Amino acid sequence: MSENIEKHNQRLPLWMLNPAEEKEARQNLKKFAYAQCVDYVEAMVECSKIHGLKVFPACNEPRDAMRKCILSYQGDSYLDVQRDLMVQQKLERLEQQLAEQKKKQQQQK
Protein backbone atom coordinates (compact mmCIF):
# COMPACT_ATOMS: atom_id res chain seq x y z
CA MET A 1 0.00 0.00 0.00
CA SER A 2 2.74 2.51 0.91
CA GLU A 3 4.52 1.63 -2.35
CA ASN A 4 1.51 2.91 -4.30
CA ILE A 5 1.65 6.21 -2.44
CA GLU A 6 5.31 6.71 -3.26
CA LYS A 7 4.68 5.77 -6.89
CA HIS A 8 2.06 8.46 -7.37
CA ASN A 9 4.15 11.05 -5.51
CA GLN A 10 1.05 12.66 -4.01
CA ARG A 11 0.74 14.35 -0.66
CA LEU A 12 -1.07 12.24 1.88
CA PRO A 13 -4.48 13.57 2.93
CA LEU A 14 -4.38 15.91 5.90
CA TRP A 15 -7.73 14.67 7.19
CA MET A 16 -6.01 11.51 8.38
CA LEU A 17 -4.50 13.44 11.31
CA ASN A 18 -6.50 13.95 14.47
CA PRO A 19 -5.98 17.12 16.56
CA ALA A 20 -3.45 15.44 18.86
CA GLU A 21 -1.39 14.29 15.87
CA GLU A 22 -1.58 17.76 14.32
CA LYS A 23 -0.27 19.20 17.58
CA GLU A 24 2.54 16.63 17.61
CA ALA A 25 3.46 17.57 14.02
CA ARG A 26 3.70 21.23 15.06
CA GLN A 27 5.85 20.31 18.07
CA ASN A 28 8.11 18.25 15.81
CA LEU A 29 8.42 21.26 13.51
CA LYS A 30 9.42 23.45 16.45
CA LYS A 31 12.09 20.93 17.52
CA PHE A 32 13.31 20.70 13.94
CA ALA A 33 13.57 24.49 13.61
CA TYR A 34 15.52 24.83 16.86
CA ALA A 35 17.82 21.96 15.84
CA GLN A 36 18.59 23.71 12.54
CA CYS A 37 19.33 27.01 14.33
CA VAL A 38 21.26 25.65 17.31
CA ASP A 39 24.22 28.01 16.71
CA TYR A 40 22.00 31.09 16.83
CA VAL A 41 20.13 29.82 19.89
CA GLU A 42 23.40 29.15 21.72
CA ALA A 43 24.70 32.62 20.82
CA MET A 44 21.54 34.16 22.29
CA VAL A 45 21.85 32.06 25.46
CA GLU A 46 25.49 33.11 25.92
CA CYS A 47 24.62 36.76 25.38
CA SER A 48 21.80 36.58 27.92
CA LYS A 49 24.11 34.94 30.46
CA ILE A 50 26.68 37.71 30.04
CA HIS A 51 24.26 40.64 30.16
CA GLY A 52 21.67 39.39 32.68
CA LEU A 53 18.85 41.90 33.10
CA LYS A 54 20.20 44.12 30.32
CA VAL A 55 19.57 41.34 27.81
CA PHE A 56 17.07 43.26 25.69
CA PRO A 57 19.15 46.21 24.55
CA ALA A 58 22.45 44.30 24.56
CA CYS A 59 21.35 41.12 22.75
CA ASN A 60 19.17 42.53 19.99
CA GLU A 61 21.49 41.36 17.22
CA PRO A 62 21.76 37.69 18.33
CA ARG A 63 18.02 37.66 19.11
CA ASP A 64 17.14 38.95 15.65
CA ALA A 65 19.44 36.41 13.98
CA MET A 66 17.96 33.57 16.03
CA ARG A 67 14.42 34.71 15.29
CA LYS A 68 15.08 35.05 11.56
CA CYS A 69 16.59 31.56 11.42
CA ILE A 70 13.78 29.90 13.38
CA LEU A 71 11.05 31.65 11.38
CA SER A 72 12.65 30.53 8.12
CA TYR A 73 12.06 26.90 9.15
CA GLN A 74 8.47 27.38 10.31
CA GLY A 75 6.83 27.83 6.93
CA ASP A 76 3.99 25.77 5.53
CA SER A 77 6.28 23.60 3.44
CA TYR A 78 8.19 22.40 6.51
CA LEU A 79 4.91 21.82 8.38
CA ASP A 80 3.63 19.78 5.44
CA VAL A 81 6.73 17.59 5.67
CA GLN A 82 6.07 16.96 9.37
CA ARG A 83 2.41 16.21 8.66
CA ASP A 84 3.37 13.81 5.90
CA LEU A 85 5.73 12.03 8.28
CA MET A 86 2.95 11.67 10.84
CA VAL A 87 0.52 10.32 8.23
CA GLN A 88 3.16 7.92 6.92
CA GLN A 89 3.75 6.58 10.45
CA LYS A 90 0.02 6.18 10.90
CA LEU A 91 -0.29 4.27 7.62
CA GLU A 92 2.59 1.99 8.57
CA ARG A 93 0.91 1.19 11.90
CA LEU A 94 -2.37 0.41 10.12
CA GLU A 95 -0.58 -1.81 7.60
CA GLN A 96 1.13 -3.65 10.44
CA GLN A 97 -2.20 -4.18 12.23
CA LEU A 98 -3.74 -5.48 9.00
CA ALA A 99 -0.86 -7.90 8.48
CA GLU A 100 -1.24 -9.18 12.04
CA GLN A 101 -4.98 -9.67 11.56
CA LYS A 102 -4.39 -11.63 8.34
CA LYS A 103 -1.79 -13.76 10.08
CA LYS A 104 -4.24 -14.57 12.92
CA GLN A 105 -6.96 -15.44 10.41
CA GLN A 106 -4.64 -17.80 8.55
CA GLN A 107 -3.62 -19.48 11.79
CA GLN A 108 -7.28 -20.04 12.74
CA LYS A 109 -7.98 -21.85 9.45
Image (spheres, rainbow, N blue to C red):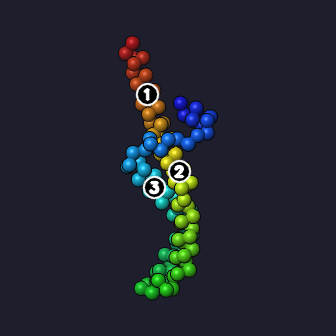
> Which one is earlier in the sequence, the residue at label 1 or at label 3?
3
Q: Position of residue 25 (x, y in %)?
A: 46, 52
Asked if the residues shown at circle 3 and circle 2 are in contact, with their CB atoms under 8 angstroms apart, the answer is: no
Q: Position of residue 14 (x, y in %)?
A: 47, 44
User: In the image, what residue type sits under mark 1?
Assistant: Leu
Q: Position of residue 108 (x, y in %)?
A: 37, 15
Label 2 SS: helix
Q: At 51% from the left edge and 82% from the top edge, which residue is drawn?
A: 59
User: In the image, what residue type sits under mark 3?
Assistant: Arg
Taking depth in this image into account, of 72 and 28 the one nearest to the observer is: 72
Q: At 56% from the left edge and 70% from the top edge, which residue is drawn?
A: 68
Q: Closer to the camera: disc 1 or disc 2?
A: 2
65 over 84 or under it: above or below? below
Label 3 SS: helix
Cα separation, mark 3 vs mark 2, equals: 10 Å
Q: Position of residue 24 (x, y in %)?
A: 42, 52
User: In the image, what residue type sits under mark 2?
Assistant: Asp
Q: At 56% from the left edge and 80% from the top edge, which residue is drawn?
A: 61
Outermost residue toward the top? 109
> Which one is earlier in the sequence, the residue at label 1 or at label 2?
2
Q: Is residue 67 visible?
A: yes
Residue at which label 1 appears? 98
Please tell me the numbered disc located at residue 80.
Answer: 2
Please tell me the numbered disc located at residue 26.
Answer: 3
